[in-house]
Amino acid sequence: MTDFSIEPLAEEALLLRFGDAIDLAINVDVHAAAHALRAAALPGVTDIAPAYASLLVRFDPAVWERADRESSLPDRLLQIVHGRAEPAGTQPRNPGIGRDEQQAARHAASADAATEVPVCYGGAFGPDLEAVAAHAGLSPDAVIARHTAGEYSVAMLGFAPGFPYLLGLDPALQVPRRADPRTRVPAGSVAIGGAQTGIYPRELPGGWNLIGRTPLVLFDPERNPACLLAPGDRVRFRAIDADEFARLTGHSA
Amino acid sequence: MTVEVVKPGLLTTLQDAGRVGFAHLGVGRTGAFDPPALRIANMLCGNPATACGL
């Protein structure tokens, strides 16, 4: 497990800091820690939110103090993340973990099926594909080939409900964000911003480069689960044409 | 029952108790900025604690 520090964020929030880079190995540890903490079901803990290299723990201090006057919450978090607590109950979207959370998380990550996201690239769906290709010194088809060849994982959800920040972008496809962001990015847009890549779950402002669009619905508050992609999920992209896009529009899988 | 808004005020919004436990999905808590104050206001009005407030 990567070393981490615990710092107070607010009177009801702690931040576990594992590093300061966008890095798959660090993010795997963040998710292993999140899973262990979720399984521990600590009293008063209301949110456990992973980011690239850190983990937010929100809690109700009054509930924590009522339940446990002896230990500090940071001490308990340290104990649990360093692997002393066994997971209890089941997490539908997460695998069971053993004593070595890091190894188990990696094993589980390879055992879990990846979610396939169909994408219609270029044209009206990907107005920035040509610019990305030019920046990369590749043809648009080569960009598509590299993008669909990648194996991605959801580092975190944020910015908007269900917006996935994906790890695994081919370094050759990294492109700086646009100098002039759009006030409206269509829902389902697949985009690249610097070393980051993600999918806009609904129409939002955005400064990333749009290379394609998926017909899948990434976030639907009426659906259970509401988010198509959960933190830690594996993702692959598959190129489709406009006809298949029309056929798949509005689907969840 | 009808409701007549006599004077809407400068910026009156409806706020509930918020969405707790969804930060990992990118869903912000939102809701009342001061949840204890909303609970007290609801108690004073005889409302359920999590009723929407103005």
Image (cartoon, rainbow, N blue to C red):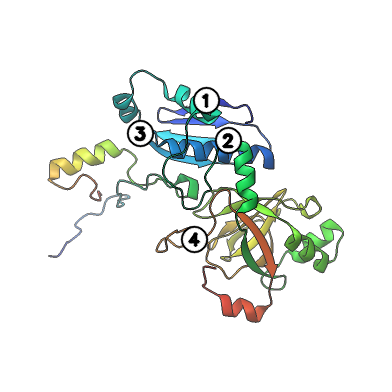
- Precedes in sequence: disc 2 or disc 1: 1
Q: Are marks 2 and 3 in contact (CB under 8 Å)?
A: no
Give the Cα separation between the discs numbered 1 and 3: 18 Å
Q: Position of residue B23 (x, y in %)?
A: 46, 45
Q: Compared to B27, does A43 lie above or below?
A: above
**A2 sits left or right of A216 in the view:** right
How many numbered discs sit on the rendered protein? 4
Q: Compared to A12, does B33 lie above or below?
A: below
Q: Which label sits in the foreground, 1 or 3? A: 3
Identify the residue position indicated by label 3 in the image: A44
Give the Cα separation between the discs numbered 2 and 4: 23 Å
Q: Are marks 1 and 3 in contact (CB under 8 Å)?
A: no
In the image, are marks 2 and 3 on the same chain? yes
Amino acid on which disc 4 is placed: Phe
Amino acid on which disc 3 is placed: Gly
**Residue A7 disc label:** 1
- Precedes in sequence: disc 1 or disc 4: 1
Give the Cα separation between the discs numbered 2 and 3: 20 Å
Q: Compared to A168, does A84 lie above or below?
A: above
In the image, are marks 2 and 1 on the same chain? yes
**Residue A219 disc label:** 4
As helix, strand or loop, the secondary structure at mark 3 comes to loop
- Alpha-carbon neighbours of circle 4 within 10 Å: few (<14), some, or many (≥20)? many
Identify the residue position indicated by label 2 in the image: A54
As helix, strand or loop, the secondary structure at mark 1 comes to strand
As helix, strand or loop, the secondary structure at mark 4 comes to loop
In the image, are marks 2 and 4 on the same chain? yes
**A151 sits left or right of A142 in the view:** left
Q: Which label sits in the foreground, 2 or 3? A: 3
Q: Compared to B22, does A140 lie above or below?
A: below
